[in-house]
Amino acid sequence: RTGDVVRFEAVLRDASGNRLDDVPVVWSHGYAATEGMLGVPATGQIAEDGSYVADVPGIHTVMATAGDLTARHTFRAEPRDVVQELEVVGHGAEDWYRTTDLWAFEGVDGRDYVITGSKVSGGYAFFYDVTDPAAITKIDSIQVDARTVNDVKVSPDGRYAALSREGATNRRNGLVILDMSTPSEPRIASVYEEGITGGVHNMFATDDYLYALSDGDKYVIIDMSDIYAPRYVSEYNHPDSRVHDVWVADGLAFSSEWGTGVVVVDVGDGRWGGSPENPVFVTSYA
């Protein structure tokens, strides 16, 4: 079934039938898409010891290669049939623009809101009141200088929001900070560009700091104590790596870095001597 760990073993023998244990084996896998399946995601995962997990149902093939020798095994993974019915309670419709990331939050007025960005749609961000999920209301929109507003974030205290920019006309991109003191009437507080002109794809907001990716190279830490004058603090760029997203919890920044895996950096935990002003690498896992 999908999700089960299937353990394979490759056994090599010499001409006399003796087992060879010191020959390196490279594992790989393939997948035949089920009829009608479009945009197939990552289909499975294989480890160096030959352990394989099928992520989607269908025909999977696991291959072991040693030199010019290859052995393979093909099998069908059945779905786990873990199904739960969902009921659509409400729909915040947007008929003209393609929305991107969203962020749900409680505003300083105690009501519940959602912000969404837009993809190649003129740089719009849309604001919804979702206090009553069955009666979602679009309350506002803001247009910024960007082709795409990919990510939107709101600080935990609801004080400010940030809109990422990609494809600005001046090619400086960066991000736009919003004053959310009146959540139903968001207004632009400032535009921040230092260190992030290459484009911001993802961000993470805390009450005091904003962590913004810069063109996939690094993330920049910005002091948000004054949202009308945000200030560059520091940055972290992992060697020989590209970053896709960052999340911060309890003073540790966790960034997803493609082939590098997950990188953990001390940005305020302190056990490794790190702070927002001095990010310190802790570990990575791939």
Image (tube, rainbow, N blue to C red):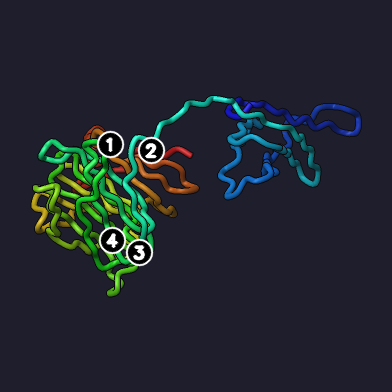
- In this rendering, position of residue 154 left or right of residue 100: left
- The kind of residue tagged 4 is Tyr
Question: Viewer-nearest of labels 4 and 2?
Answer: 4
Of the two numbered discs 2 and 1 on the same chain, state the one appearing first in sequence.
1
The x, y position of residue 149, in whole percent, is 31, 59
Of the two numbered discs 1 and 3 on the same chain, state the one appearing first in sequence.
3
Question: Viewer-nearest of labels 2 and 1?
Answer: 1
Q: CA distance from mark 2 to mark 1?
A: 41 Å
The residue at which mark 4 appears reads as 124
How busy is the neighbourhood of tag 1: few (under 14 within 10 Å), some, or many (20 plus)? some
The x, y position of residue 212, in whole percent, is 28, 53
The x, y position of residue 108, in whole percent, is 11, 40
Image point (24%, 50%), residue name = 138
Q: Secondary structure at mark 1?
A: helix
Image point (47%, 27%), residue name = 85
Whether residues under marks 3 and 4 lie with C-beta atoms below 8 angstroms apart, the answer is yes
Q: CA distance from mark 3 to mark 4?
A: 7 Å
Q: Secondary structure at mark 4?
A: strand
The residue at which mark 1 appears reads as 133
Q: Nearer the viewer, residue 215 or 128?
A: 128
Q: CA distance from mark 4 to mark 2?
A: 38 Å
- The kind of residue tagged 1 is Pro
- The kind of residue tagged 2 is Thr
How busy is the neighbourhood of tag 4: few (under 14 within 10 Å), some, or many (20 plus)? many
